[in-house]
Every structure is written in C-alpha cells, then in structure tokens.
Amino acid sequence: MQNITAVILAAGKGVRMKSALPKVLHKLCGKPLIYYIIKEVKKAGIERVVIVIGNQAELVKKTINDLFEGIEFIEQKELLGTGNALVQAKNKLRKEDNILVLPGDAPLITADSFKKLIAAHKQDNSCTLLSAYLAYPQGYGRIIRRDKKIIEIKEERDVSCTERKIKEVNSGVYLFKTKPLFKALSKISPDNKKKEYYLTDVISLFAQQGLKIDSLSISEKEILGINTRKELACAEKIMQTRILENIFKKGASIIDPATTYIAEGVRIGKDSVVYPFTFIEGNVKISKGCQIGPFARIRGDCLIGNNVVIGNFVEIVRCKVRDNSRIKHHSYLGDCLIGRNVNIGAGTIIANYDGKNKNRTVIGENAFIGSGTILVAPVKIGKSAITGAGSVVLKNRDVPDGATVVGVPARLLKRRKSNG
C-alpha cells in the first residue's frame, strides 16, 4: 500500500503518571515509551512519521531527535483532545492516501500487528482499526457494534452501564483513508464530559454515512496503554520477556530471567552466559563465550570482547574490554580500555571522575592489576605491567610496559641483581 504516513499523538500531559516528565518520555527497559512505537512503525515499512507534540514540546522533540533521524513534528498549542491534535497535522497530510494514527503511550504493539493491519485495510475501507477482547476491559474505550458492524467507539467515562460490560476495546490505533477522515474531523464537536474533540467521534460519523469500518483483533498484551506507574511496571515485564526471548534465539543463556535486567538495545553473543542478579543497561555489546555476573552491573557504552569474565559485584561503565580478560570480583571500572588477557584483581577501583571531568584509563594487554589497586585517571598501564596489591597509581603517572609498581603512591619496583 502506497502513501501511508504514521501520525503519533504525543501531546498530552499524562496526569495520572503524577510526574513532571511527559508521559511518552517515561522509560521502558531503558528507552522512552515513544521510542518503541516509532521503532515498530518503521520496522513495518512506514517511512514517514509525524509526531504531534504539546506538553513540554521542546523536550519531547529533542529526546526523539536524539534517537531517530527524519521525524517530523507538529505542535498542538492547546490540548483540546485527539481529534484536535490530528487537525493540526492536516496541512502536512493532504497528499497522503492513508494515515496510520497511533497513541504515543502504547509501546507494546508490534510491527507484525501493523503489517497485518495494513493488509486488512481493503480498498473500500474508510477505517481499519486495532481492537482487543479483554476479560477486564476497565479503563478502555469500548467498540460498539450493531449487527456485527462497528457503529461507534465510546470512551469509558461516557459509556452506559450496559455498554460498560462490552469486552471488545479500542487500542487507539486506526488506519484511515485521508479524505473521509478530515471531512469527518471538520464535523466533530466537544460534546462530552471533558469538553474535548475526540478522534473516536469520527467512527460514528463514518457509520452514519455508511462508510466501511473494519477491525483487526490483537492480543491483550499488545494493547496495553500506559497511563499509570502500575501499567508502566506491567509493560516492563512484558517488554523484558521479549528482550530475553530475542537473546535466547541468538544463542546466549540467561540463568534466571526473573532476577536479571537487560535493557533494550543490549546485544549478547552466542554461548555467553548471564548469571542471576545482573543488570545490563544502555548501549552494551557482549561478544561470544562471556560469563557475566552474578551481581554484576554493566552500564552504557560498554563493548565486551570474546571469552571475557565479569564476575560478582563488578560495575563497569563506558569501557572496552578485549578478549580473554578477567574482572572477577568487587571492582568498579569507568571510562577505560582494557587490552587482551588482562587480569583485574579483586577490589580494583578506577577513580575516573575528578569532580569536573570523566577521565580515561588504558590498561595494556597481558597486564596484571593486583587486588585493591586504585588507578587515578587519566593514567596508562603498559603491556605486561604489574601493580602490586593495594597500590595507588596517581594520575598521569603512567606505568611502562613490563614494569611493576607497588605502594602508596605507587613507585617502580627495582629488581635486585643476581650475585650469581
């Protein structure tokens, strides 16, 4: 199908989140809610994405631009509802044949469902929408049917006692033909309890005009919209399961998924094993055959080579650790490059922050860092160098290749000449 533009409605305040942060920027497995919607829409093959912003518009815009290129924005100056939000985009969308409208707070809908929705949107459909059947539909707008045909969507606050029992609910995702959509939007009015222009009113106008409305049912897990902190926590579990399933498919092991946290975007290579109570966050790549944890924390921008061991109570951030190195116990390493075959002894600390800047440490291949060593960055430890247990290597006091340093502050250990 040609000329589909996705329009994501992300202008609202998200009052029920009880937060100063716009709802669409709340984090889900390390990424903003709206990140997942954009990602899945693009994965479904829709290239053009327009986002309607309003509440803290500049912050939302900057956050999205840091994640994606080529996103277009339209600002809704007055937050007068979803129908009004779409009207703001009218001038940008006149030439499109079809418009996919999505809420900015429904991060669990997959690209596969978007593809199926597009396939179900027949030539004579004015609207094809996503719905779901829920055992407990509280909080969702209801799909109202007559003789199996959709005639209306009602927000929960506006339904009657009888309509409240309806199990089919609205996802907030619609694929519209452009011309009938904007014609109907010009006719809706804020005749509801919130005095807002509801996009859902377009559906009843279509039904009254005899225009065809179709639907596609998706799973309960996908339809979850995020309006509260509790719903965000529920979505976290679902998304975490998806992330772990992808890791399993690529040949890595997670010993106990219930006690392991892995953020969106983390990559773990074949035959690597992650032990319980491990947190892996941000832009992290772990290569093949590694052992991570238990009780380890790997933070953003880390690149872990092959056959690396990162053991219990180890935290690393912004580090590159090359093949066959070992960081097995009770250490903190920040802003460092660790060469191949390096041993980092228990209790090693890299003091990377001087109160103003994060400074870099380089440890050469085959180096041995003794237990309890403190490296004050910036500093370089040479190839095959050794630091004695308890050493404090001060900043800019680089250790030459093959040298041994000991003490506080660390000094070169002179080897005694043999009398023989």
Image (spheres, helix red, strand yellow):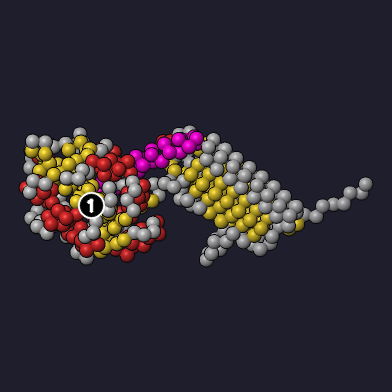
At which x and y percent is residue 125?
17, 45
| Residue 63 visible in the picture | no
Is residue 234 located in the magenta-colored stretch of the structure? Answer: yes
| Residue 182 image position (x, y, % from top left) | 16, 57
Q: Is residue 114 above or below residue 374?
A: above
Q: Does the magenta stretch include residue 126?
A: no
Determine whether the residue tagged by mark 1 lies in a helix, strand or loop: strand
Left or right, residue 137 beside residue 22: left
- Where residue 408 appears, as percent x and y from the top left, is 69, 57
Camera-side residue of 237 and 47: 47
Residue 282 image point, x, y percent: 45, 50
Please tell me how many numbered marks the rendered image carries: 1
Front residue of 1/66: it is: 1
Q: Which residue lies furthest to the right in this view?
A: 420
Q: What residue type is labelled 1?
A: Asn
In the picture, measured across the screen, residue 363 lies left or right of residue 164, that is: right
- The residue closer to the viewer here, 293 or 3, is 3
Determine the residue positioned at 20% across, 36% down.
133
**In this rendering, would 109 be left or right of 139?**
right
Q: What stretch is highlighted in magenta?
A: 225-254
Identify the residue at horizontal 22%, vertical 38% (top origin).
217
The residue at the point 39 percent across, 56 percent down is 67
**Residue tagged 1:** 98
Q: How crowded is mark 1: few (under 14 residues within 10 Å), some or many (20 or more)?
A: many
Whether residue 191 is visible to the viewer of this picture, yes or no, is yes
Q: Is residue 378 left or right of residue 33?
A: right
- In the image, residue 355 above or below residue 109: below
Identify the residue at horizontal 16%, vertical 55% (top origin): 179
**Majority SS type along the magenta span:** helix
